[in-house]
Amino acid sequence: MSGRERHTGSAARARRRRAGGGERPPLALVAPAVVAIAFVALPFVALLQRAPWGDLGGLLRDPVVTDALRLSLIGACAATGIAVVLGVPLAWLLARTEFPGRAVVRALVTLPMVLPPVVGGAALLYAFGRRGLVGGPAYDATGLLLPFSTWGVIVANTFVSMPFLVITVEAGLRSVDRRYEDAAATLGAGRWTTLRRVTLPLVTPSLAAGALLAWARALGEFGATVTFAGNLQGRTQTMPLAVFLARESDQGAAIAISLVLIAVSLLVLVPLRDRWLGS
């Protein structure tokens, strides 16, 4: 094959990639990829195979399921909102400023991602419980008690999900072309105006992706929630907790709740991923 033919073939492959057609994968990668797909898909196939399809409607109308779904959505949405309000400023500080102990702060922020959730729940209990470091004085002054309440679910969900938003937004801020911000400052825009009108729009895809990851993590939270907030139906029992409890007493109900959780996650993750992450 001449050099010109090789160049023509390379150009054709490049055009196909730009057109979204992809390229032929190396055979050495196909088999591991198929195994990976099967490894992820088989548990869901087994769950669908064991689902009580004939009784599914009645199981899904059970108050345990509806209460758990409501609490899961409330907890995940509230935790995501708090994570955005607190996490975006923190991501900006980590990405744009130098201060003593920044590496330690970054490590602390990411710690809930690798920490066993039960340990995180115990730490929350010792911090915000009735006799906790902060929760004790707060309870004595106001009567506010976070454990075993819906707010306890929200706090636990925020604790485990906010790191996903922080690291995603921080990465987006680091990749922003600073020339746009410099141009806005040259034109007379203040720091707040530049942040609001230039920086945040530029990191919107990263912010959306981080919020999506935080929401999904909060929706599936189990360990920190059950340790800090308990497992009270209608008050703190979220969908994962309901699955765990029903698995021992009613396997059909556990499978039905699991299917609802999977369906809700897919309904949110698939279209949003195509819109924000896929671009």
Image: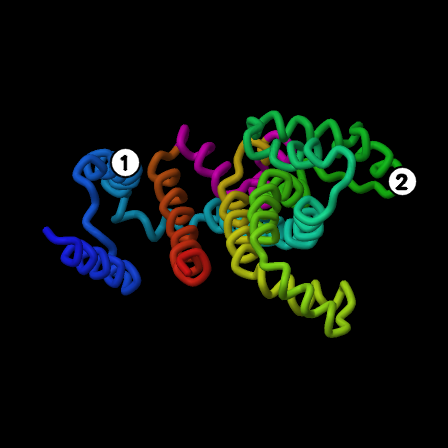
Residue 215 percent across, percent down from the top left: 53, 50
Residue at the disc numbered 1: 36
Mark 2 crowdedness (10 Å alpha carbons): few <14, some 14-19, many ≥20: few
Residue at the disc numbered 2: 141
Which kind of residue does numbered mark 2 sit on?
Ala
Residue 106 percent across, percent down from the top left: 66, 36
Q: Is residue 55 above or below residue 126?
A: below
Residue drawn where x is 42% and y is 51% of the image: 265
Which kind of residue does numbered mark 1 sit on?
Ala
Quarter location, residue 109:
top right
Color style of the picture: rainbow
- Left/right of residue 137 with respect to residue 168 in the rendered view: right
Q: Is residue 139 above or below residue 24?
A: above
Task: Tell which tag, 2 or 1, sits nearer the viewer.
Answer: 1
The furthest residue to the front: 3
- Note whether residue 162 is visible: yes
